[in-house]
Image (spheres, rainbow, N blue to C red):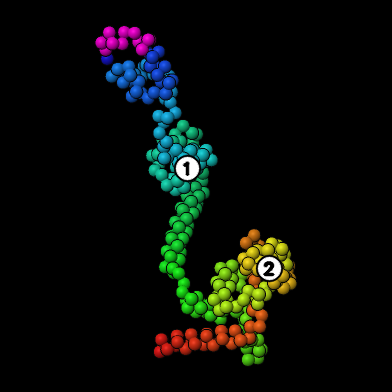
Amino acid sequence: MTHAPGKYADFEGLRERAVALRRAGLSRRQIRDRLHVDNNDILNRLLEGEPPPAWTKRPNAKDGLRARARELRLQGWTYDQIQVELGCSKSSISLWVRDLPKPERRDPSEQAKLASRKRWEHELAVRDEERQKTKVAAAAEIGQLSDRELFLLGVGLYWAEGAKDKPYDRRENVTFVNSDPSMIKVYQAWLDLLGVERTRLRYTVMIHESADVAAAERYWADLAGADRSAFYKTTLKKHNPKTVRKNVSDSYRGCLAIRVLRGADLYRRIEGWWSGMVLEAERRTA
């Protein structure tokens, strides 16, 4: 293509001006308008070899995916595996990694197993996300508990997890044992509702002797908001070398027992409250 000789006769001088403007941070459009260059081919020649300024480079939402795809390809992953892992198209993957060496061919059965595993991991992640959504929605349904709702909840909670009197073993005391911190919190809120003073509470940590006993004692004292002087001596469960413990993670802190001093009258009322709840449930189902 030929151009009017007069307009671009001093090409080198025009290029010097274009390069200077480029290095000053101007965009192609700004240079074109400044120099009145209305032909893209000429503009390309004027700016040949000059990189664009950083501000003109738009961030690409897929830059992270591209980098991850290249990383996986270098590890020997196939297009199918990368697609399952990143959730992007094979055409994009091919474009991103086409300059990289092809991975060694694996045995078809091994490749199928790897692809199946990645699909299953993806499915597990989707299921876990759905579970979390369900839990969050269910928690929102509860709203604010009334005093009566907390009262009834506490009665049922105690009767399920607390110590109970037996005809053959008279034990009219209020003792609640649990390893779930949330259960402990609800139980203490229930005792507060009943007007049980915290000074009447005594605590005992029960834990396997091979665990971090000191850390467990600190954890339960902080959770209960109780002074260490309110704790009885920790009960240690002896280790049986023939058994394999599964609760060996850092989250294992044993159980906490909470006893209410002078609790005989409270125990009798709890048993009566539970009996009343059972009678009402039977009436509703009759």
- Would you say the residues marked 1 and 2 are in contact, meaning their CB atoms lie under 8 Å apart? no
Count neighbours of disc 1 (C-alpha within 10 A) and say few if under 14, some if 14 to 19, many if 20 or more.
Answer: many
The image position of residue 76, as x and y in percent, is 52, 41
Write down the residue under mark 1: 78
Q: Examine the residues drawn in magenta and state their main secondary structure.
A: loop
Q: Which residue lies furthest to the bottom in this view?
A: 167
Residue at 31% across / 11% down in the picture?
8
Element on which disc 2 rests: loop
Q: In which quarter of the image is residue 199?
A: bottom right
The quarter of the rendered structure image containing the N terminus is top left
Q: Does the magenta stretch include residue 268?
A: no
Q: Please give left or right for residue 227 compared with residue 155 in the image.
A: right
In the rendering, at what x and y percent does residue 2 appear?
27, 12
**The C terminus sits in image quarter:** bottom left
Res. 227 mark: 2
Given the image, on which type of amino acid does mark 1 rest? Thr
Image position, residue 125 (x, y; %): 47, 55
The correct choice, above or below, for 7 with respect to 93 in the image is above
Residue in the image at 34% along x and 23% along y: 30
Compared with residue 219, is residue 191 higher up or lower down, i.e. above or below? Answer: below
For the record, the magenta segment spans 2-14
Q: Which mark is residue 90?
A: none
User: Looking at the image, is mark 1 or mark 2 earlier in the sequence?
Assistant: 1
Res. 25 visible in picture: yes
| Mark in front: 1 vs 2 | 2
What residue sits 38% from the left and 39% below the top? 91
Residue at coordinates 68% horizontally, 68% vertically from top-left?
Answer: 227
